Image (cartoon, grey):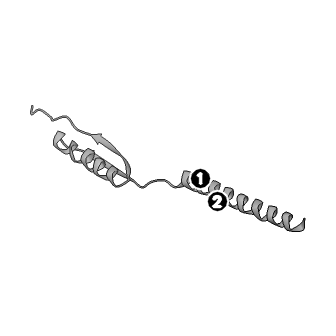
Amino acid sequence: MAEIDKDIERLIDEKVAQEVEKRVAEVFKAFVKKPRAAFIASKGTLDMAYPPPYSGHFGCGFGYGGGCFFHLLRPRHPE
């Protein structure tokens, strides 16, 4: 009987250890964020607006998240 109790205790310990390891991995995965990149296009024309999305799309292929910020100025007309 004592041998069966030891086997049951060993089995329970193994199952608990597996479950704890699984849950710790889930929590760790939730807190680990993927690297991010930011692309800023400012004080330019529409020609300057093309490189940030292309660079961002290229970064997504390598697992990066990112965002683009555009602040394009209107051309001023000479007075």
With 72 as the anchor, is 27 left or right in this view?
right
Closer to the N terminus: mark 1 or mark 2?
A: 2
Position above or below: 31 against 67: below
Q: Residue at x 34, y 55 (%)?
A: 62
Total tally of numbered discs in the picture:
2
**Which label sits on residue 21?**
2
The spot of residue 55 in percent (x, y) is 26, 50
Look at the image and tell me in which quarter the N terminus lies.
bottom right
Nearest the eye: 56 or 23: 23
Element type at marker 2? helix
Q: Residue at x 67, y 59 (%)?
A: 18
Nearest the eye: 19 or 78: 19
The spot of residue 5 in percent (x, y) is 86, 63
Position above or below: 74 against 39: above
The spot of residue 44 in percent (x, y) is 20, 43
With 8 as the anchor, is 58 left or right in this view?
left
**Which label sits on residue 26?**
1
Q: Residue furthest left?
A: 78
The spot of residue 23 in percent (x, y) is 64, 54
Nearest the eye: 9 or 32: 9
Element type at marker 1? helix
Q: Amino acid at mark 1?
A: Glu
In three-dimensional space, the C-alpha distance between marks 1 and 2, rounded to whole angstroms, equals 9 Å
Classify residue 68 by image quadrant: top left
Q: Amino acid at mark 2?
A: Glu
Q: Residue at x 73, y 58 (%)?
A: 16
Estimate how packed mark 1 is, as few (under 14), some (14 to 19) or many (20 or more) residues with alpha carbons within 10 Å: few
With 50 as the anchor, is 36 left or right in this view?
right
Q: Residue at x 68, y 58 (%)?
A: 20
Look at the image and tell me in which quarter the C terminus lies.
top left
Nearest the eye: 54 or 20: 20
